[in-house]
Amino acid sequence: MRNLIDIKDLSIEEIDELIKVAKDIMQNPEKYSEKCKYKKLATLFFEPSTRTRLSFEAAMMELGGNVLGFSEASSSSTSKGESVSDTIKVVGGYCDIIAMRHPKEGAPLVASVHSDVPIINAGDGGHNHPTQTLTDLLTISCENGRLDNLTIGLCGDLKFGRTVHSLISAMSRYKNIKFVLISPDELKIPEYIKEEILDKNNIEYVETNQIEEHMSKLDILYMTRVQKERFFNEEDYLRLKDYYILNNDRLRTAKEKLTIMHPLPRVNEISTEVDSDPRACYFKQAKYGKYIRMALILKLLEIK
């Protein structure tokens, strides 16, 4: 039985295979419409989510399966003090696969130890978000036609942004990848990411406070939200939340084929005027998430 807790749980070959299946689903949806008939997905979301939870549910439904679960901790027995391991043991008896989001780092890993069905980490605190990373990889592959030879700008909250950490980890395994890390000093990429991934793999990267300075070199610009829920001090949040706002003016020097991405939800870090730019891919990106999750569910349930 396989789980997906960290993007590193998947080999490059497995990621490429998932992308291939997702693209086939996009082109031939009817071929997959009953692949999960009589199968059930439980969505255990101990933390609020719109896209991730609904895209998992849509994915299972489009495969012909059913969904059960909860969308916040207060509507589960956790509010009565039940442990994650007990919840998982119980819910595992009702379903075939579990997608779980939790505010505590490591909770899905704990769940996987106690589960009799596959666990998918749908985000754990500031730690990992592997299905968002798979979504990002499918987006990059569809929009750029490749996953190598790319210069990727990551902008905003690089300290707490789990999507950024997972994406760096995944993309570092492809050839000739360069990163431009754009953030205020308080939200710089953690040292362990630099040491364990970038430096260890001899990945070229630049750290900067300025978004305009490197715009013309980027193939991909990945914007992130400055997350209020990750701050201990509201004053710091208010000071930094509008530090980088992407607008048409800032895109003047960008490549014609730039791919603008964002894991969403957006607050105001991308001006709505950018939405009509053909390079804006963030709403498409959200849709790609459904297809890659369909491919992942099939893989973990070992359905050909």
Image (cartoon, helix red, strand yellow):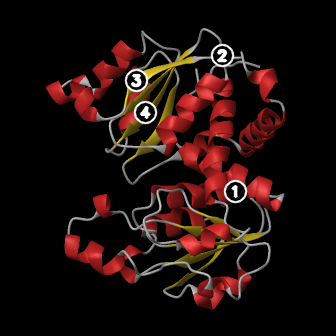
Residue hosting label 3: 69
Which quarter of the image is occupied by the C terminus?
A: top right
Nearer-N-terminus badge (2/4): 2
Q: Please give the name of the residue rendered at 50% of the width and 44% of the height, measured from the top-left corner.
A: 51
Q: Residue 91's spot in the image, x, y percent?
A: 38, 16
Compute the Cα span from label 3 to label 2. 17 Å
Q: Nearer the viewer, mark 3 or mark 4?
A: 3
Viewer can see residue 5: no
Compute the Cα span from label 1 to label 4. 26 Å
- Check if mark 3's residue and mark 4's residue have beta carbons within 8 Å: no
Q: Residues within 10 Å of mark 3 (few under 14, many from 20)?
A: some
Compute the Cα span from label 2 to label 1. 32 Å
232 or 265: nearer the viewer: 265
Residue hosting label 4: 100
Q: Determine the secondary structure under disc 2.
A: loop
User: For the residue marked with disc 4, what is the amino acid?
Assistant: Met
Residue hosting label 1: 173
User: For the residue marked with disc 3, what is the amino acid?
Assistant: Gly
Q: Nearer the viewer, mark 2 or mark 1?
A: 2
80 or 3: nearer the viewer: 80
Q: Nearer the viewer, mark 1 or mark 3?
A: 3
Q: Nearer the viewer, mark 2 or mark 4?
A: 2
